[in-house]
Amino acid sequence: MNPKRKQRLLIVLFIVVGVGVAVGLTLFALNQNINLFYSPSQIAEGEAPQGTRIRAGGMVVDGSVQRSTESLAVSFDITDYDKVVRVEYTGILPDLFREGQGIVAQGELDSRGVLQAVEVLAKHDENYMPPEVAEALEKAGKMPKPAGQEFNK
């Protein structure tokens, strides 16, 4: 093989290896940033992975909110009216967070099956529900009626 062909072959191989490394790093970075949504039923049944960032949504169970008197730690249960999952969060909760309302929490499941949340999002008005939460509640057949429509015929 003459030196000119050898040089071209090395350049082509270098480009192919470089593109391969770039694609591999891109896929790795994208995989680390994917936040899949799981309902409380899916989490309770073991479908959600531990140690991976996920999003979980549901309705905050009435009477389940426990706030620490010494820190910003709070724990509460969320449900899709089929299963219940415990969520622990340290930080300031959204102003619209309250019992009986739909929320989405982002975090990781620990070995106890408790979601260690790093972010909690609450709905912005009385009729809005995050699409993932609404879909999970519809699948469970437990979708609550919108406010103000209880007496409409």
Image: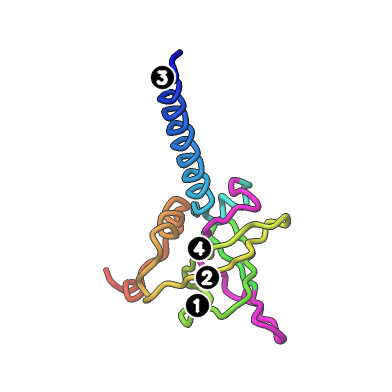
* Residue at image coords 49%, 79%: 94
Q: Which mark is residue 120?
A: 2
- Pointers 4 and 3 in contact (C-beta within 8 Å): no
Q: Between tags 3 and 1, which lies in front?
A: 3
Q: Tag 3, which secondary structure?
A: helix
Marked residue nearer the N-terminal end (3 or 1): 3
Going by the numbered disc 2, the residue's amino acid type is: Val
Q: Choose the circle earlier in sequence order: 4 or 2.
A: 4
Residue 5 spot, x, y in % from top left: 41, 19
Q: CA distance from mark 4 to mark 1?
A: 12 Å
Circle 3 residue: 5
* Left or right of residue 8, residue 32 in this image: right
Q: Amino acid at mark 1?
A: Phe
Mark 2 touching mark 1, by CB under 8 A?
Answer: yes
Rounded to the nearest whole Å, what is the CA distance between mark 4 and mark 2? 11 Å
Disc 2: CA contacts within 10 A as few (<14), some (14-19) or many (>=20): many
**Separation of marks 2 and 1 at Cα, in angstroms:** 9 Å
Does the residue at mark 4 contact the one at mark 1 (Cβ under 8 Å)? no
Whole-percent x and y of residue 72? 64, 81
Q: Which residue is mark 4?
A: 58
Q: Which residues are magenta?
A: 47-74
Q: Earlier in the sequence, mark 2 or mark 3?
A: 3
Can you say whether 105 is above or below 21 in the image? Answer: below
Q: Is residue 44 left or right of residue 2?
A: right
- State yes or no: discs 4 and 2 in contact (Cβ < 8 Å): no
Q: Could you tell me how far apart the alpha carbons at marks 2 and 3 are, in whole angstroms?
A: 60 Å
- The residue indicated by pointer 1 is 97
Instruction: Give the dominant element type of the magenta stretch: helix, strand or loop.
Output: loop
The reply to whether dot 3 and dot 1 touch (C-beta < 8 Å) is no
